[in-house]
Amino acid sequence: MSLIVEKVSKRFGEQVGLHDVSFITGPGEIVVILGPNGSGKTTLMRTVSGELPPSAGYIRIDGGPVSRFRRSAVASSGDQRSVFTGFTARDYHRVWKLLYPRFDDTLFLRFADQFAWDLSRRIDFAPMGMRSLFLTLGALACRPQLLLIDEPFQHITPQESDILCDILRSFTDEHRSTVLLASTELYEPESLIDRFVILKNGKLLYTARLDEARRTHRIVSGAGDEANFLTIGPIIAEWLVFTEEDIGRPPTMRELVIGYLNGAAD
């Protein structure tokens, strides 16, 4: 499926949550929304999901407005990991099957076995890491066309992070679904990321496919007005610059994000 976010703004009274944000995705892409706390990541995710109507601009999913998109085709997992009091993993399983016609029992039970979930255990009593994985993978088992996950790598171990990355990559490649993944600092593994969006203070700093961004940016040791490139921002003793010349070295994902955040005015 395809997603178009065009000049989207969101206001909460006098407060601006998002200002003129635009980006696109293609089928089977994992798109990472990056930025510091308060940058607008969660607001953007809630707006794309249809939970919050935009104050300006529009969002199109497969060419139509969010309001016309089948709700069973969208699944999400929020950053607060809120759960129903007293619900066991098996209770959630039953609810997801009722709400999502495409729910994959085999996939869910494979996750349960892989992570040794006790389906009779209350989820509100579970450690935060288990709760995070359970909600994220439960949403994925609903086999949505659009999956939105807010901070899925918080509270889980590095080994669980690696397994989750492999699961997400396999899911998008097989089902051609789109995954929007909000994170304060997700830079690796780069093989997980197809496209990224950098936000600061509700404004879009930069968005591109990762392969394109690495082709059009370099890390150099010095920057100046006389040079034949556009200086983006400092990274310790080096600079991120926009150029296709074969100078310096290609940036990592982390350097791309930090360069844009450091170069943006508050």
Image: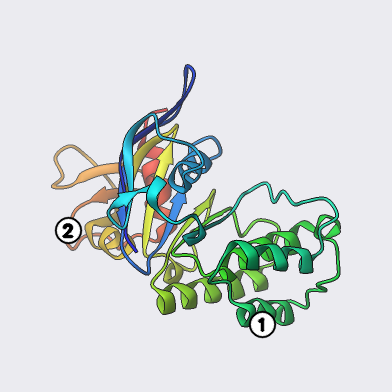
162 displayed left or right of 213: right
Badge 1 crowding class, 10 Å Cα cut-off, few under 14, some 14 to 19, many 20 or more, is few
Q: Name which residue type carries label 2.
A: Glu
Q: Position of residue 35 (x, y in %)?
A: 48, 44
Mark 1 / mark 2, whichever is N-terminal: 1
Q: Position of residue 102 (x, y in %)?
A: 53, 72
What residue is drawn where x is 48% and y is 78%?
A: 170
Q: Which residue is mark 2?
A: 244
Badge 2 crowding class, 10 Å Cα cut-off, few under 14, some 14 to 19, many 20 or more, is few
Colour scheme of the rendered structure: rainbow
Q: Which residue is mark 1?
A: 110
Q: Is residue 213 above or below residue 20?
A: below
Callout 2 secondary element:
loop
Find residue 199 and report its image quarter.
top left
- The answer to whether the residues at label 1 and label 2 have Cβ atoms under 8 Å apart is no
Q: Is residue 83 above or below residue 204?
A: below
Work out how far the residue at label 1 is from the one at label 2, CA to CA, in angstroms: 45 Å
Q: Name which residue type carries label 1.
A: Arg
224 displayed left or right of 102: left
211 displayed left or right of 111: left
